[in-house]
Image: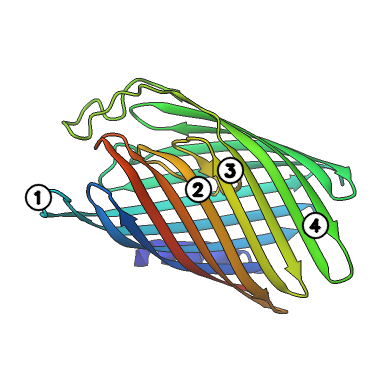
Amino acid sequence: MKKSLLLFLSTASLLCASSDISMTSGKKEYQNSMTKVDGATFNLNLSHKYENGKISLGYLKDDVTRRHSISNVDLEDLDVKKYNGLYQHSITKAVNIKVSYIGIVDNLAPTNDGKIYGIGAGYKFGKGFGAKLDYYRSDYEPFNVNQYDAELYKGFKSESLKARVAIGTKMIRIDGDTYNPNDSVPKQYDFYKKSYNPVFVKLGLNYQGYVAGVGAFFGKRMFTVMDDGAKVQHHAMEQDKTYMASLGKKFKNFDIVAKYSYQNGNELPEKRDNVDTKVVSLNLKYKF
């Protein structure tokens, strides 16, 4: 981890006019999982704004304690690192484009060394109303995933209140037959379902510097790319219910935001249903 952070900060030093750096630290709790008990997550992100767009670099690390729920035997901990990059550019005041990339290092999952490429475009119709279309290609050794995102959003503004509501859908298509063809049971898993179409809704509020947000996914999904191509869920976990909430305060050069997320789904290779994942985190951002 120290080498990864040193490399990240060395790259950050080249962007002497970068606009903000943020750190997120959180705790994970699992219920009814076959092997996952609890864990910690850490995220470091650097963003640099220029006249017509933005460049972002990110580093994410997850450590998860594992113990077999039936035999009660301690197992090797899960160690995941992800690196991401995002480039956004405004062609005109109404049209913008983006490209993104995620690299995965996972000590246990067959999706180790996965690479996710993304492209997208957005259009502003005016008065805070706009649309976004994105495509992501997740390249894993045993299989691939194609994801198509469509989103509509509307912003509202008064003297002291700003609000933004967004609705959209994700079309996820799995290209392949087996999750882990070269490993043994229980990780061996043949995809019986290769198509998912979840929908989502998000609401964000800013009242005199106090910020709040809520969001939800409806419908099953798997291997989902999220957060404009900055995050990906790369394990064979079929999520069903997802709810998110955040609350914080923006200062002149500093933001602090607390976040909570809840997911319920099925661990497919382990044939484990009704698995809850809860994450509580704190995000600190410094703008300079």
Q: Is residue 246 above or below residue 208?
A: above
Whether residue 112 is visible, yes or no, is yes
**As shown in the figure, which amino acid type bears the numbered disc 4?**
Glu
Determine the CA span between mark 4 and mark 1: 58 Å
**Tag 2 secondary structure:** strand
Mark before the other along the chain sequence, 4 or 1: 4
Question: Residue at horizontal 47%, vertical 62%?
Answer: 43
Question: Residue at horizontal 44%, vertical 50%?
Answer: 263
Q: Is residue 100 above or below residue 47?
A: above
**As shown in the figure, which amino acid type bears the numbered disc 1?**
Ser
Residue 6, position in %: x, y? 42, 67
- The residue under label 3 is 100
Mark before the other along the chain sequence, 3 or 4: 4
Whether residue 18 is visible, yes or no, is no
Contact between labelled residues 4 and 3, with CB atoms less than 8 Å apart? no
> Disc 1 vs disc 3: which is toward the camera?
1
- The residue under label 1 is 71
Left-right relation of 99 to 31: right
Quarter holding the C terminus is bottom right
Mark before the other along the chain sequence, 2 or 1: 1
- The residue under label 4 is 51
Residue 85, position in %: x, y? 56, 50
Residue 25, position in %: x, y? 45, 68
- The residue under label 2 is 242
**Tag 4 secondary structure:** loop
**As shown in the figure, which amino acid type bears the numbered disc 3?**
Ser
Q: Compare residues 50 and 82 and report the one nearer the observer.
A: 82
Mark before the other along the chain sequence, 3 or 2: 3
Determine the CA span between mark 3 and mark 4: 19 Å
